Image (cartoon, rainbow, N blue to C red):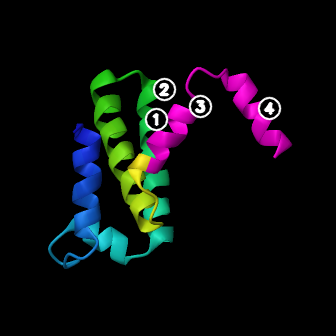
Amino acid sequence: MTALDRLAATIEARKTADPESSWTAKLLASGPEKCAEKFGEEAVEAIIEAVRGDRVRLTAEAADVLYHLLVMLAGRDVALADVLAELERREGRSGLDEKAARRRR
């Protein structure tokens, strides 16, 4: 089990936790829109650090992005396993081909 798997499992478990005892539970109780907003904020912070070139800060912000992505997914009942399955489906396929296929849908 990877760190992401363990984190996803912890987030899933926090769905039923008291929002006063857990930041994750508080985010999830705020609704999927708030979870998405927090993900967006963290993504912007990671972008800023990428532009600045601060590897240490970018690493920390990237960890925040991954955490908030998993919270956002949990808020909409999308499992990490489903996202990983989609990545596996795309594996070995050109990104250009994948984008072209999405436009045809």
Where is residue 78? Give x, y as percent: 46, 59
Inter-mark Cα distance, 3 to 4: 13 Å
Element marked by disc 3? helix
- Can you tell which of label 4 and label 2 is closer to the viewer? 4
Circles 2, 1 touching at the beta carbon (< 8 Å): yes
Q: Quadrant of the N terminus?
A: top left
Image quadrant assignment for residue 22: bottom left
Q: Which residue is mark 2?
A: 51
Q: Amino acid at mark 4?
A: Ala
Main secondary structure found in the magenta portion: helix
Circles 3, 4 touching at the beta carbon (< 8 Å): no
Q: Which mark is residue 90?
A: 3
- The correct choice, above or below, for 83 with respect to 50 in the image is below
- The correct choice, above or below, for 75 with respect to 83 in the image is below
Inter-mark Cα distance, 1 to 3: 29 Å
Where is residue 13? Give x, y as percent: 23, 66
Tell me which numbered mark, 1 or 4, is placed earlier along the sequence.
1
Q: Which residue is mark 1?
A: 48
Where is residue 97? Give x, y as percent: 74, 25
Callout 3: 10 Å neighbours few (<14), some, many (20+)?
A: few
Q: Amino acid at mark 3?
A: Arg
Circles 1, 3 touching at the beta carbon (< 8 Å): no
Tell me which numbered mark, 3 or 2, is placed earlier along the sequence.
2
* Lateral position of residue 72 relative to residue 4, left or right: right
Q: Amino acid at mark 1?
A: Ile
Q: Which residues are magenta?
A: 82-105
Element marked by disc 2? helix
* Lateral position of residue 102 relative to residue 29, left or right: right
* Lateral position of residue 22 relative to residue 93, left or right: left
Q: Which residue is mark 4?
A: 100
Q: Is residue 44 visible?
A: no
